[in-house]
Image (cartoon, helix red, strand yellow):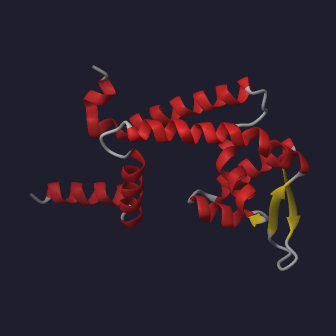
């Protein structure tokens, strides 16, 4: 038996990481096989710019629920790669708005069939499951948004110490 599966709840973060790594490697392989110079870590930011642009770094961070520095790192790579442009906002000169560059726009039709395939395969795998992983992840994220894991563990430890 898989030792991490045996550890069950104790290894949840490790199992999520392992699942993520499995996807990351597979998607990277598909991009490379398709001859595309595109990184998995760029995808969510890039897709948001495709669907929403022009958009600010702060708005991207809020929409994705990730850190501002994390978004800046990805955006800098996308700008350096020439897929995204960054321009000052007409309304607020302190704010920079991100849009697709001509190279970025040219990349979308090459990426879209791959993204469609990713969605189709994931849907197929999800329908073959007893429980819906996406729904379970959403529920976990909502619970953690209400009360972070660290606070839950501290409360549990405090309760255990008082019993």
Looking at the image, which is closer to me, 126 or 155? 126
Q: Residue furthest left?
A: 163
| Quarter of the figure with the N terminus | top left
Q: Position of residue 50 (x, y in %)?
A: 74, 55
Q: Position of residue 75 (x, y in %)?
A: 76, 51
Left or right: where does residue 105 sit relative to residue 142? right
Q: Residue at x 79, y 33 (%)?
A: 37
Left or right: where does residue 59 sit relative to residue 80? left
- Residue 58 position by quadrant: bottom right
Q: Residue at x 74, y 27 (%)?
A: 34
| Quarter of the figure with the C terminus | bottom left
Q: Residue at x 22, y 56 (%)?
A: 156
Question: Is residue 49 something that shows in the picture?
Answer: yes
Vertical placement of residue 49 versus 115, above or below: below
Looking at the image, which is closer to me, 11 or 5? 5
Q: State the count of labels.
A: 0
Q: Position of residue 155 (x, y in %)?
A: 25, 60
Looking at the image, which is closer to me, 118 or 94? 118
- Residue 98 position by quadrant: bottom right
Vertical placement of residue 161 versus 30, above or below: below
Vertical placement of residue 113 versus 31, above or below: below
Vertical placement of residue 110 versus 65, above or below: above
Q: Position of residue 72 (x, y in %)?
A: 73, 54
Q: Residue at x 39, y 45 (%)?
A: 133
């Amino acid at each position: 038996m898989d030792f991490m599966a045996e550890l069950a709840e104790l290894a949840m973060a490790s199992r999520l990481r392992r699942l993520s790594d499995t996807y990351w490697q597979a998607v990277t392989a598909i991009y490379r096989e398709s001859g595309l110079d595109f990184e998995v870590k760029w995808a969510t930011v890039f897709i948001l710019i495709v669907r929403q642009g022009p958009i600010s770094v702060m708005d991207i961070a809020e929409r994705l629920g990730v850190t501002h520095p994390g978004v800046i790192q990805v955006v800098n790579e996308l700008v350096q790669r020439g897929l995204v442009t960054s321009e000052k906002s007409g309304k607020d000169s302190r704010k920079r708005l991100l849009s697709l560059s001509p190279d970025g726009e040219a990349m979308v039709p090459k990426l879209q069939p791959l993204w469609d395939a990713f969605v189709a395969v994931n849907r197929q795998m999800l329908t073959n499951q007893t429980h819906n992983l996406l729904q379970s992840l959403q529920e976990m994220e909502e619970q953690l948004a209400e009360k972070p894991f660290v606070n839950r563990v501290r409360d549990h430890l405090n309760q255990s110490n008082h019993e």
